[in-house]
Image (tube, rainbow, N blue to C red):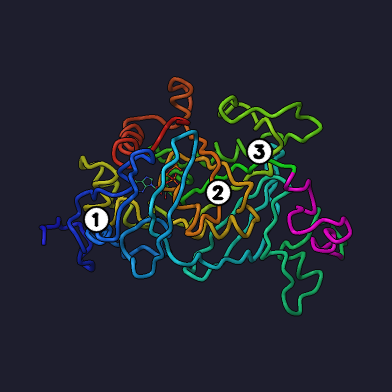
Amino acid sequence: MPDFPAHASPAFTPAASPRPRPQARDRGISDLHLTKDEDQLVQVPPPLVSPAFTPPRTPETEGQRHDRASHPHKHSVGGEAEVTERAQFLAELPEVTCEVRARIPTTTGTEMWLHLYHNNVDDKEHLAIVFGPNIRSKSLDRQRPGESERDRMIRGAYTGTLYPGRTSSRRVDAIRRDAGVGEEGAGVGMEKKDLGPPLVRIHSECYTGETVWSARCDCGEQLDEAARLMSLPWPTPSNTPGSASPSQRPLFDDPPAMPSCGGVIIYLRQEGRGIGLLSKLKAYNLQDLGHDTMEANLLLRHPGDARSYGLATSMLLDLGLGGDMGIRLLTNNPEKVRAVEGPGREVNVVERVPMIPLAWRTGGKEGVHGPEVEKYISTKIEKFKHMFSSG
Ligand SMILES: Nc1nc2c(ncn2[C@@H]2O[C@H](COP(=O)(O)OP(=O)(O)OP(=O)(O)O)[C@@H](O)[C@H]2O)c(=O)[nH]1
């Protein structure tokens, strides 16, 4: 067993050396030659499994292989060459239920709908922040035993807006029935078949970057930017003269050139890339001692990235965003693209939209900048193989 430094967790016996493993996250999508046979898969060393790691990983993690089914998996994202991989996934997606939804007004006039989810794999409250009127949670709208119209309104299972004295939730199924639209119809906005794919961000919790203004990472900025993009005025067929292809479309400064279904930020409680705030703060001290963000995790006997995205897949499906229409995923992280699609390709990522740091786009005038964030982003590029262009 290798010698671990004193700051490494005493409670955990590592399953393997804490050196960066040659694994999928260390390669770009186009580098994946995924014709591995089962023998090759078995030879891959097991990962360092974090004791703080709660949700099961759906993507191609080597651990928990006995739980996994193997599926041929095709990608064609952001214009990249289509590759086929034999990815390892959990056989089943987690079950999720939207417990409550509420309107969140903002000072800019944008309104969003905060959806709080429970699930069957952890006890955390994961969130979906929904922009636009066309995305609704199926589990939220479902009738619950014995509930009154007021109960439904209190948990957010209503259509339109609440006002003092309102007595009916105006159920979506009744509206659909009256309008003669089936499952596909959004019921309260336009029909989904007339709309383009929604913009989706899968965001992981970062207390330091989002709440205490840390300039070690760009997480707060990314959350703000995702919300800004999803708050842009929604084009409708009547005010949209024509649709441009994704490659013709400016990435950040214009709304999508075709009517979009809306936008969703899936906010997962996976602080510190899944290692938790306690370990992340230790990792920051290791970073101040000269290690990069991946090395610091490994020295603490955590994986470089301990996150999973099965909950995000299930939440997107609950919001009606699987299927043919697909989603446009706002990320630089190739692993997220693969993982969110799910074990049976339940969600289809039709486009990856990169997140370019604001400091890069403004010549350093705006956005998070400084030596720490620069090192953080360069490690994302070099070791996590994040892609900061639309290619
Ligand atoms: N362990 C660790 N986690 C960090 C550090 N800096 C930020 N994080 C966490 O990294 C996560 C941010 O990742 P995301 O922004 O969701 O996604 P990403 O993998 O960076 O990829 P993008 O989608 O391109 O942003 C959050 O959970 C942060 O708390 C760090 O130095 N160490």
Kindly state the secondary structure of the residue where label 1 is placed: loop
Residue located beneath label 1 in the image: 300
Q: Which residues fall within the magenta stretch?
A: 168-193
In the image, what residue occupies the spot 52% across and 56% down?
Answer: 312
Q: Residue 245 at x, y = what percent?
A: 61, 29
Dominant secondary structure, magenta: loop
Q: Label 2 amino acid?
A: Asn
Q: Residue furthest top?
A: 363
Kindly state the secondary structure of the residue where label 2 is placed: loop
- Residue 128 located left or right of residue 283: right
Give the number of the mark in front: 3 or 2. Answer: 2
Q: Looking at the figure, which quarter contains the C terminus? A: top left
Q: Residue 75 at x, y = what percent?
A: 47, 44
Mark positioned earlier in the residue sequence (1 or 2) = 1
Residue located beneath label 2 in the image: 348
Q: How much space separates mark 1 and mark 2, taking CA atoms?
A: 35 Å
